[in-house]
Image: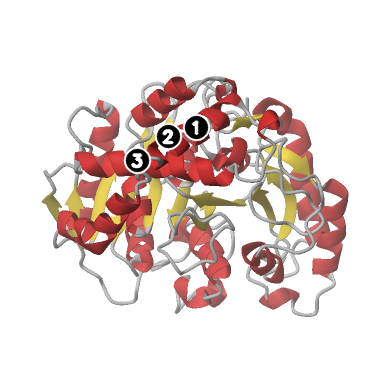
């Protein structure tokens, strides 16, 4: 589109066609903005600066917990307001200013409180295996990208809500460190960050740069050459600096506290990914320590406390069983001062840095077990939801509590056929390091762009 080889209306129309064809089986979208998106595509096409727009006419999906002007923001709940939003959230405004066209708003669990993506508005499914969840809470966004309905999607991550769906759906994503991208309104005590979901590292870097309002994040010396949809191989050097960078990479295939299991194929993927980085010239060291038990307890207490806070002002008669149970647990623990704040502050102050050690980047599993069934988990109680969430996705929350950047990178497929994702973590300010290593992995182990057609 920037080169005049395609037009924004035609590209948006093609993606709307893909949504109409595929989303009945996937359930990624709560709202499809067909008429409005086409009108916006025509407006983008008429812009005098079309050739300079980083995301000229690119169709994007937005998660249903940030404001899109003129659309309702339901946050997966019948208890929220049905009035249209008067203004875009800053991240949406930046995407639109860069030329992107919002084609739809994606499904989330109620109030984004779980690692699934079911609500009264529908149940999102994993394009690789529709019987399984695409993860959550940005599962609708991940499913939309993995099914080829949009090339980029917005999501956010409070306890893993970008990295979990990316791992489920075979995508690359990044949860930036605190302060880089404007957060969602409910930022969960600075644990939640907005970020992109994509199929390639170049797409991801470009979208992150747009969301951050800092184009230097995306290949500073090659940004003018970046084109959405191209792989790292299309631009030798890609996201990598012009001079070789040698990083110290710590590999932790089993970083969880005692009592937590990790699928053996997921562990092997972590070890293999670290070996790939070692072959690229980085120093790989073992990280044998496990995360402290108290940190997991703090994460669960913070989860419950955020549920308690997020239901404030809502009609509880219209809330789902899961939401009410999580909020009730938060109120109960709150009476004893157990809201995760002390553990979070302790981890941020020195715990994360000490545990991380002298590595530049940590490689861990993104998930501990296969994605659970796509079901109406919102209609189930506290124990069922907590048990399944903790069993399959306990590896991400530590870095929300710390406020450190972390990302998920695809690394092969499980024997069941679903993708495998590995997690990369860096200290504050390490987003470029993460993108550099992700690019190395992508170059050595390219992953499929999309799930096969259903």
Q: Is residue 92 above or below residue 287?
A: below
Q: Residues within 10 Å of mark 3 (few under 14, many from 20)?
A: few
The Cα atoms of the two marked residues, 2 and 3, are separated by 7 Å
Residue 211, x across and y down, in percent: 57, 66
Badge 3 is on which residue? 336
Q: Residues within 10 Å of mark 2 (few under 14, many from 20)?
A: some
The Cα atoms of the two marked residues, 1 and 2, are separated by 6 Å
Q: Is residue 251 above or below residue 178?
A: above
Residue 96, x across and y down, in percent: 71, 66
For marks 1 and 3, the one nearer the N-term is: 1
Badge 2 is on which residue? 332
Badge 1 is on which residue? 328
- Do callouts 1 and 2 mark residues in contact (Cβ within 8 Å)? yes
Out of 430 and 231, give the one closest to the viewer: 430
Q: Is residue 46 left or right of residue 229?
A: right
The quarter of the rendered structure image containing the C terminus is top right
Which residue corresponds to the image point at 23% horizontal and 56% vertical from the top-left? 352
Work out whether residue 422 can be spotted: no
Out of 302 and 290, give the one closest to the viewer: 302
């Amino acid at each position: 589109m920037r080169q005049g080889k395609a037009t924004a209306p035609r590209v948006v129309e093609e993606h709307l066609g893909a949504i109409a064809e595929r989303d009945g089986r996937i359930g990624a979208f709560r709202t499809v903005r067909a008429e409005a998106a086409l009108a916006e595509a025509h407006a983008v096409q008429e812009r005098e600066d079309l050739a300079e727009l980083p995301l000229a006419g690119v169709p994007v999906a937005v998660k249903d917990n940030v404001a899109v002007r003129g659309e309702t923001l339901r946050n997966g709940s019948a208890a929220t307001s049905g009035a249209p939003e008067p203004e875009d959230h800053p991240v949406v405004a930046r995407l639109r200013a860069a030329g992107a066209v919002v084609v739809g708003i994606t499904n989330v669990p109620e109030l984004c409180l779980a690692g699934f993506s079911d609500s009264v508005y529908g149940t999102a499914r994993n394009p690789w295996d529709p019987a399984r969840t695409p993860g959550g809470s940005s599962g609708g966004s991940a499913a939309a990208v993995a099914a080829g309905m949009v090339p980029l999607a917005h999501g956010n991550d409070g306890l893993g809500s970008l990295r979990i769906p990316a791992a489920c759906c075979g995508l690359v994503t990044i949860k930036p460190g605190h302060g880089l991208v404007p957060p969602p309104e409910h930022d969960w005590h600075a644990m939640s960050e907005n970020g992109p979901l994509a199929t390639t590292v170049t797409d991801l870097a470009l979208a992150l740069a747009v969301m951050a309002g800092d184009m230097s994040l995306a290949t500073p010396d090659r940004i003018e050459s970046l084109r959405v949809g191209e792989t790292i191989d299309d631009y030798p050097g890609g996201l990598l600096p012009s001079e070789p960078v040698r990083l110290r990479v710590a590999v932790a295939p089993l970083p969880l506290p005692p009592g937590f299991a990790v699928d053996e194929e997921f562990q092997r993927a972590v070890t293999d990914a670290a070996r790939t980085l070692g072959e690229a010239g980085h120093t790989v060291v073992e990280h044998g320590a496990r995360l402290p038990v108290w940190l997991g307890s703090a994460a669960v207490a913070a989860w419950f406390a955020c549920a308690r806070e997020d239901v404030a002002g809502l009609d509880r008669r219209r809330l789902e069983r899961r939401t009410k149970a999580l909020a009730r647990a938060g109120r109960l623990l709150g009476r004893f001062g157990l809201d995760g704040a002390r553990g979070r502050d302790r981890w941020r102050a020195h715990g994360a840095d000490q545990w991380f050690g002298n590595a530049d980047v940590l490689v861990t599993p993104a998930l501990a077990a296969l994605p659970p069934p796509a079901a109406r988990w919102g209609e189930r109680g506290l124990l069922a939801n907590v048990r399944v969430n903790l069993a399959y996705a306990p590896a991400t929350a530590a870095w929300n509590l710390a406020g450190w950047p972390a990302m998920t990178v695809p690394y092969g497929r499980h024997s069941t056929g679903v993708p495998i994702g590995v997690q990369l973590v860096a200290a504050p300010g390490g987003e470029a390091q993460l993108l550099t290593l992700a690019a190395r992995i992508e170059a050595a182990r390219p992953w499929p762009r999309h799930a096969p057609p259903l």
